[in-house]
Image: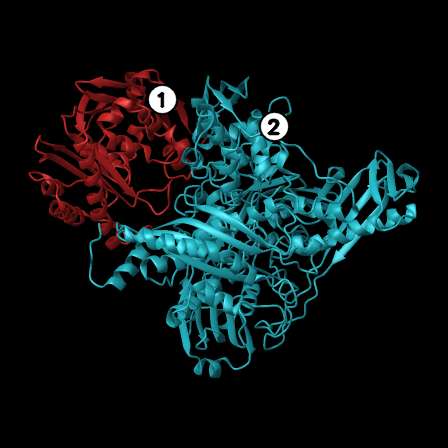
Chain colours: A red, B cyan
């Protein structure tokens, strides 16, 4: 720990400059719920730590064109208390709120969950299903990238040197649209997802599914968007037949690991079951709009 | 890199110069001396370090100091106002919400956060708010009750003389736990202490050589000494006098992942800066023996070279002719049942410190067995036992895991050699890797009964994986055959218990000593017999319940306090109601199915067929101080309170006069270990005798009769015997050197006989009995089990303190639930509290406790033990409920969702797709 350098810049530009100038290991600290554990367990090299919690623009939730721009350092608790986001993107909020205990909720951030790049990150499938975009700022300026493109594998991201995710944009929703997220853990709370499924859908005025996105977590090296699963829903009234095709497509997309939390066969099975159940919840929400 | 950071703590501003990435939990404890904030995992998994940051609960181990700048922190030390407990603290005290007390600060702050926003929360809100704090003792229910009852008025009534036994008394040591004043193993380490860090094997089996240490010393000026096997006068320990097979530091060979290889002693920050790879240990891995099959295989590599066949012990019991009797049974059931390594997961990791005082050594440590620690440490250092003094700290949970040595010999050796105080606190992963575990078992059993359901014969073959060293393996292998039949009368019994070495952590003592594993087997087979004969599952158990006058498997004829039948009778109404409710629920369809199960148990209190005496003393000083010298360590179960209640009533003075000295080996007599549910029964009897002894002396001095009343008023003892009144001026009596003028003493060693070659004898003086029912819902598609309710009927002889009795049962049930559904320790994979899952508040269901008091004539006021009985019937009851819901008989625990799902599928045939 002696070799750690700690900086708490007041702006994104300062943070980027610090990270870009770092020679050797540099880490972004937001809620610290992953970083501090990794430091303690000697999983990462000590170096520069840039604390972005003090950058006010990263702490804001701002309505934008019917959607919301959510600062990367917004915590799960803050998101959960935001009635606006909850009303429009309930699945994203419920995914974020599943991360850890109340104590962790007060610390863990949306940007951190994304950039930690765990295949089991709960918020990521929900953000992918929501077709969320994130703003990345780095030495070469600002760029927008789909959430699905951030993680490239366990602990690996597409972010370049000195780049940080500053916010996440959840788009506007039409009428009769809703999302839902379900995950499976063996214990009642505080565990890592064995499987996570997010479903986002839009119904037309006749109740036919006009658009859908389905994303899976914890069944592959990174969260997956599964167009085949969405296709099972689009164009119909999300009946039993469609739900079964959805489940089959979700199962077919799984490439899970086999560990003490579940076998390959079990995780694959669970993905299908949760896909059906999540779609059912999203459907009910969309119908009650 | 250190800078000054300012923030407020409990209303006052503090300025701390420390690295900004230092965790707030460490800052509070080390820089500010606020040790009420506990560290259980340092990873945000256990919530013990929960504090309020600007009013919101956070894990202080997850907050870097830099992020606390300018903010307001509230710790447990800030909750009481003006020396008076807050309403929340008072509710915790009233409800017995603190057992060992290690999670209590975190629980209080988590609840404070909720109550600040919602003064009258409902139960789901409370459970949600507490969900991030793990408790291993209470089963959470009394904590939830306390938070829900926060608005109730505080009652400070103290029972009058002679009425302490049976009273729902708050714990005598509870106040300190609620204010953060209780000092656990890591809380009172001297500032000038050196620290000790253990270097552990990353391999399950390897030979190793230690290289040149000079570069390590050169690179780390704060490193004072590296200890190795060569530094130990006697490098072996173990709980049996003739079996010291575990080295303190491995000597060229490691036999399990996590085994201690070297001990680094030095400045704390210097030790933290040393990477494992920088320590020159060259390992040459060798083939590891993993699991029972490998250990028992013909020609298997030997874990310990002098233990042929990897066999530690082969114990057995034979009564009648079980094989012949089985042959003539109308119904027979059989099965093989397997259990996993289970971690104790006490929230306080092993911790302590030692110092040398001339020719003596002082050991301040979290332990369940101060006298054994004293003797073992002395033996290792080549000292006389009297040269070692053990002063137990508060113990933040034990459950059997703190019966074995951990930090003790290491800090003792370092302090002895270096003549400086030396401290060691295990990190969570090393605690989990190195400490003992519950024995994995493979139990093959057959039960047979006649056409009326009356048991005729039982055979049981129980094999245990005892890990790399003996620890308590022999105890488990001997205790299980005695308990093989379950709490039933069986004329013909053949039972065998064996334990085998493997390259795994030593399996040792864990709440129940093997009986929870064997109960899973006997209860499943009782359900089988009931099904075959079309009998109700409760009815067949009642028909076979041991009764007074009947002989056990070991031929012991039980004369009194055989309370299974009354437990079952008490359980019958809730059993019928639960069955009807489940039938109605299942008619509604859906993904979930409801089942009801039942589990029964018996448990011999104390050591098996061995002496296990306890001695207690009670002294009156010339200054009027009444001191209870109690060598029984309270590990949260409440023995300090319960033994004081017993002693107070035996003496006839109110409890309020009692001052306690607990566990100090210089001042208290040996009360034996806090294990085997023995302290209430054995030490409780000794406490009763000590109280009676002192009372007798007082009455003789006053020449008063046996019914006289005694009152203590300053230094005056007033004795009222009918119309006669006597005053004894204590300061006028001749005093011993320590000021004692009257001293009562009591000793009790429960009457037992050793087991003979056929396992026959009277191994225990008394037995606890219990029956529990569980209601559980199973999601057929996912294999998930949700336990909804437990009703627990326990024969405790006499409930000395019903709050503590309920607390023991609640906590046992939570651990039994973990055993049944989620807990499985896998070396290298589950060495932390996010991969090794223990029940959270959300996992523990509503619990109803029915206390049955079938008095034990030998026990104090009729009492016997309850510590382990709470756990034993729970897993069988839950597994019975799963079977009732799904038809699947679980043969391997934990019944993880993927295993249960696979079993449901195997039963249903080809893939169904229940939504």
Q: Which residue lies at the image location 37% right of the left edge and 33% below the top edge?
A: A35
Foreground tag (2 vs 1) = 2
- Same chain under badges 2 and 1? The reply is no
Is label 2 in a helix, a strand or a loop?
Answer: loop
Image point (39%, 46%), residue name: B835
Asked if disc 2 and disc 1 are in contact, CB closer than 8 Å, the reply is no
Viewer-nearest residue: B202 or B595: B595
Query: B755 or B703: nearer the eye?
Result: B703
Subunit bearing disc 1:
A
Residue A36, image quadrant: top left
Task: Examine the rendered structure and indicate whether residue A236 appears above or below residue B884.
Answer: above
Q: Residue at x 44, y 71 (%)?
A: B445
Q: Residues within 10 Å of mark 2 (few under 14, many from 20)?
A: some
The image quarter containing residue A233 is: top left
Task: Please indicate, yes or no, whether residue B591 appears anywhere in the rendered image.
Answer: yes
Q: Tell me the element at label 1.
A: loop
Tag 1 residue: A53
Answer with left or right where residue A177 lies relative to residue B68: left
Q: Where is residue B202 in the image (x, y as percent from the top left)?
A: 43, 51
Residue B874 visible? The answer is no
Judge whether B604 appears above or below B781 on screen.
Answer: below
- Placement of the C terminus of chain A among the 4 image quadrants: top left
Structural distance between the alpha carbons of marks 2 and 1: 36 Å
Residue furthest to the left in view is A235
The image position of residue A173, as x and y in percent, is 16, 25
Q: Position of residue B625 (x, y in %)?
A: 80, 37
The disc label shown at residue B85, or none = 2
């Amino acid at each position: 720990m002696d070799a750690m350098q700690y900086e708490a810049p007041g702006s994104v530009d300062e943070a980027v400059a610090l990270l870009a100038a770092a020679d050797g290991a540099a880490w972004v600290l937001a809620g610290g719920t992953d970083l501090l554990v990794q430091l303690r367990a000697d999983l990462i090299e000590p170096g520069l730590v840039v604390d972005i919690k003090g950058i006010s623009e990263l702490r804001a939730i701002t309505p934008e064109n019917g959607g919301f721009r959510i600062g990367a350092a917004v915590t799960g608790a803050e998101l959960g208390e935001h009635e606006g986001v909850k009303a429009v993107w309930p699945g994203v909020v419920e995914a974020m709120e599943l991360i850890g205990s109340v104590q962790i909720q007060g610390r863990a951030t949306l940007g951190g969950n994304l950039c930690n790049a765990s295949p089991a990150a709960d918020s990521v499938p929900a953000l992918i299903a929501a077709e969320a975009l994130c703003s990345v700022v780095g030495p070469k300026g600002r760029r927008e990238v789909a959430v699905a493109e951030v993680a490239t594998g366990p602990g690996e991201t597409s972010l370049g040197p000195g780049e940080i995710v500053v916010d996440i944009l959840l788009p506007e929703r039409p009428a009769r649209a809703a999302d839902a997220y379900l995950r499976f853990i063996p214990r009642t709370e505080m565990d890592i997802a064995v499987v996570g499924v997010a479903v986002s859908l839009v119904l037309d005025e006749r109740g036919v599914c006009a658009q859908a996105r389905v994303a899976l977590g914890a069944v592959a090296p990174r969260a997956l968007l599964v167009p085949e699963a969405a296709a099972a829903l689009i164009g119909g009234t999300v009946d039993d037949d469609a739900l079964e095709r959805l489940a089959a497509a979700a199962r077919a997309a799984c490439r899970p690991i086999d560990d003490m939390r579940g076998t390959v066969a079990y995780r694959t099975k669970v993905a299908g079951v949760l896909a059906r159940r999540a779609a059912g919840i999203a459907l009910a929400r969309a119908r009650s709009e | 890199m250190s800078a000054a950071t300012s923030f407020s703590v409990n209303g006052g501003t503090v300025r701390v110069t420390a690295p900004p990435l230092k965790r707030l939990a460490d800052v509070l404890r080390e820089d500010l001396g606020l040790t009420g904030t506990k560290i259980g995992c340092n990873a945000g998994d256990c919530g013990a370090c929960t504090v309020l940051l600007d009013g919101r609960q956070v894990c202080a181990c997850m907050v870097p100091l830099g992020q606390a700048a300018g903010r307001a922190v509230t710790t447990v030390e800030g909750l009481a106002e003006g020396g008076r407990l807050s309403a929340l603290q008072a509710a915790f005290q009233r409800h017995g919400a603190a057992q060992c007390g290690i999670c209590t600060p975190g629980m209080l702050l988590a609840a404070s956060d909720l109550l600040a926003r919602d003064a009258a929360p409902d139960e789901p809100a409370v459970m949600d708010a507490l969900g991030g704090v793990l408790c291993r003792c209470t089963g959470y229910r009394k904590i939830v009750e306390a938070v829900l009852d926060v608005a109730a008025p505080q009652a400070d009534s103290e029972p009058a003389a002679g009425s302490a036994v049976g009273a729902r008394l708050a714990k005598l040591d509870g106040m300190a736990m609620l204010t953060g004043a209780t000092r656990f193993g890591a809380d009172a380490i001297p500032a000038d202490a050196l620290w000790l860090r253990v270097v552990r094997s990353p391999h399950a089996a390897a030979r190793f050589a230690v290289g040149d240490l000079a570069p390590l010393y050169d690179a780390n000026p704060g490193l004072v000494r590296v200890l190795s096997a060569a530094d130990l006068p006697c490098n072996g320990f173990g709980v049996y006098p003739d079996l010291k097979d575990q080295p303190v530091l491995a000597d060229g060979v490691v036999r399990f992942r996590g085994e201690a290889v070297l001990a680094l002693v030095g400045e704390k920050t210097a030790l933290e800066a040393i990477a494992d790879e920088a320590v020159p240990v060259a390992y040459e891995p060798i083939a590891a023996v993993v699991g029972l099959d490998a250990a028992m295989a013909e020609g298997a590599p030997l874990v310990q070279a002098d233990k042929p066949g990897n066999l530690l012990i082969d114990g057995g019991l034979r009564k009648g002719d079980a094989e012949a009797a089985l042959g003539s049974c109308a119904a027979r059931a059989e099965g093989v049942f397997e259990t996993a390594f289970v971690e104790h997961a006490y929230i306080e990791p092993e911790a302590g410190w030692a110092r040398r005082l001339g020719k003596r050594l002082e050991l301040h440590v979290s332990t369940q067995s101060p006298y054994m620690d004293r003797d073992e440490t002395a033996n290792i250092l080549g000292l006389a036992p009297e040269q070692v003094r053990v002063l137990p700290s508060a113990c933040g949970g034990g459950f059997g895991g703190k019966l074995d040595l951990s930090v003790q010999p290491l800090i003792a050796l370092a302090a002895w050699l270096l003549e400086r105080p030396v401290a060691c606190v295990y990190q969570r992963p090393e605690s989990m890797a190195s400490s003992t575990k519950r024995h994995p078992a493979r139990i093959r059993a057959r039960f047979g009964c006649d056409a009326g359901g009356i048991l005729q014969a039982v055979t049981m073959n129980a094999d245990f994986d005892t890990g790399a060293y003996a620890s308590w393996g022999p105890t488990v292998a001997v205790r299980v055959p005695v308990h093989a039949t379950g709490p039933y009368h069986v004329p013909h019994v053949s039972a065998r218990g064996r334990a085998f070495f493997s390259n795994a952590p030593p399996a040792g003592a864990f709440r129940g000593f093997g009986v929870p594993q064997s109960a899973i087997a006997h209860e499943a087979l009782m359900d089988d017999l009931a099904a075959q004969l079309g009998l109700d599952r409760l009815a067949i158990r009642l028909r076979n319940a041991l009764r007074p006058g009947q002989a056990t498997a070991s031929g012991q004829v039980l004369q009194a306090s055989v309370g299974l039948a009354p437990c079952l009778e008490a359980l019958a109404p809730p059993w019928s109601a639960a069955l009807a409710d489940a039938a109605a629920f299942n008619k509604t369809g859906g993904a979930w199915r409801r089942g009801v199960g039942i589990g029964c148990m018996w448990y011999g209190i104390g050591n098996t067929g061995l002496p296990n005496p306890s001695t207690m003393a009670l002294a009156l000083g010339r200054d009027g101080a009444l001191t209870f010298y109690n060598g029984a360590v309270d590990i949260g179960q409440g023995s300090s309170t319960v033994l004081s209640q017993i002693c107070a009533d035996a003496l006839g003075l109110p409890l309020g006069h009692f001052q306690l000295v607990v566990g100090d080996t210089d001042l208290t007599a040996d009360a034996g270990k806090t294990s085997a549910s023995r302290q209430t029964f054995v030490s409780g009897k000794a406490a009763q005798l000590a109280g009676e002894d002192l009372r007798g002396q007082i009455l003789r001095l006053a020449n008063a009769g046996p019914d006289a009343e005694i009152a203590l008023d300053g230094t005056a003892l007033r004795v009222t015997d009918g119309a006669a009144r006597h005053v004894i001026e204590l300061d006028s009596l001749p005093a011993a050197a320590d000021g004692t003028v009257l001293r009562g003493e009591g000793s009790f060693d429960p009457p037992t006989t050793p087991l003979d070659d056929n396992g026959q004898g009277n191994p225990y003086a008394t037995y606890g009995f219990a029956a529990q029912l569980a209601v559980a819902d199973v999601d057929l598609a996912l294999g998930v089990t949700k336990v909804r309710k437990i009703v627990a009927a326990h024969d405790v002889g006499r409930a000395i303190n019903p709050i503590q009795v309920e607390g023991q049962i609640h906590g046992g049930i939570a651990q039994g639930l973990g055993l049944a559904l989620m807990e499985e320790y896998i070396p290298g994979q589950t060495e932390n509290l996010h991969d090794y899952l223990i029940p959270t508040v959300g996992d523990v269901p509503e619990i109803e406790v029915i206390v049955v008091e079938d008095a034990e004539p030998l026990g104090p006021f009729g009492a016997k033990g309850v510590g382990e009985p709470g756990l034993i019937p729970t897993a069988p009851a839950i597994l019975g409920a799963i079977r009732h819901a799904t038809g699947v008989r679980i043969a391997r625990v934990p019944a993880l969702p993927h295993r249960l799902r696979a079993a449901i599928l195997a039963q249903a045939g080809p893939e169904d797709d229940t939504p």
